[in-house]
Amino acid sequence: MTTTVQATTPTGEAPRRSDLGWHGSSFATQVWVLTQRSLNTFLRDPRMLFFSLLQPLVMLLLFSQVFGGISQLPNMHQWGSYINYLLPSTLVTTAMTSAMSSGVGLLTEMSNGVIARFRSMPVSLFSVLLARSLSDTVRMAIQLVVMLIAAALLFGFTPAGGMMGVAAALAVSLVVGWGLGWLFLAIATWVKKAETMQAVAFLTMFPLMFGSSAYMPVSTMPGWVQVIANVNPLSYAIFASRGLATTIWEANPAYTLIASLAISGLIALVGGVIATRNFRRTN
């Protein structure tokens, strides 16, 4: 015969989790542990690591060869070679592409039961989103550094801005990718399906990428495309990254730099609020 004993408080009510001393870890500890967990998932999978690092190199190879003839245009001689024009913008577009995986990764964990297990623990749901954002930013930084090294060794990338300029361009790209990552996290909590997520993401990314100065000067585009490129928020980040790496500015340096960082921060704020609200409402 077994006897079930139920603890009660002095008022006769069942004790709450806090009354039993189960408070969970601090918010900072939760973010640290969850960030490490996401990074370990990435670093311990050789195939995921290999293809994640290979993808930006393939994109750089294709675009440098397909659009290489643009270097013959009269106003392109100042860059020295097309790779000097292309790589700073590729840092930004690669960061944007990598940001999409934040939403895909979150959807994967929502479907395989990992998030459901987190909900049963004394874990802040915002720490789950923040950890995902931070780990994906670290992964993004690894991709961009590998691409920079490959561009210098294999493609002859010679930035006039030196190491400091390239580091600043890398930092701008990471901020842009981090901000867009929150946008894709918000989309993930809204669409709930990976297929829909990818469709929305590509529909968002391609107009931003090709409707900007990422691959060719704005002055060479048709008039209506120039209007779109000049108001495209991605163009500000590309102008800033290219100017920092090459010291050749296509627009006002302070304006483009501040605008790119401010827009990224605003996207991160709005995306974070929406993602957190939807995430808490998701069953």
Image: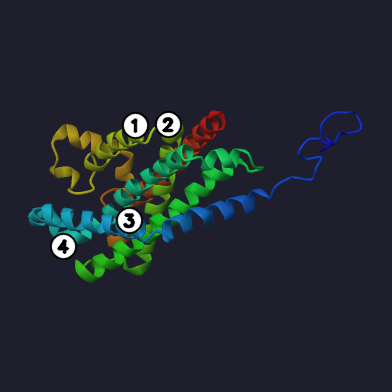
Q: Are marks 1 and 2 in contact (CB under 8 Å)?
A: yes
Q: Can you tell which mark lies on residue 81?
A: 4
Q: Is residue 127 left or right of residue 91?
A: right
Q: Quadrant of the C terminus?
A: top right
The residue beneath circle 2 is 192
Q: What is the crowding at mark 2: few (fewer than 14 residues within 10 Å), some, or many (at least 20)?
A: some
24 lies above or below 3:
below
In this picture, is 196 found above or below 216? Answer: above
Judged from the image, the secondary structure of the residue bearing numbered disc 4 is loop
Q: Residue at x 33, y 40 (%)?
A: 233
Mark 4 or mark 2: whose residue is earlier in sequence: 4
The residue under label 1 is which amino acid type? Answer: Thr
Query: On the image, which quarter does residue 48 sit in?
Result: bottom left
What SS does tag 2 mark? loop
Alpha carbon separation for disc pair 4 and 1 = 39 Å
The residues bearing labels 4 and 3 have C-alpha atoms spaced at a distance of: 27 Å
Q: CA distance from mark 1 to mark 2?
A: 8 Å
Marks 3 and 2, Cα distance to the nearest angstrom?
A: 24 Å
Name which residue type carries label 4: Ser
- Disc 3 crowd rating (10 Å Cα; few below 14, some 14-19, many 20+) is some
Q: Read off the residue under disc 3.
A: 52
In the image, residue 60 lies at what x, y percent? 22, 57
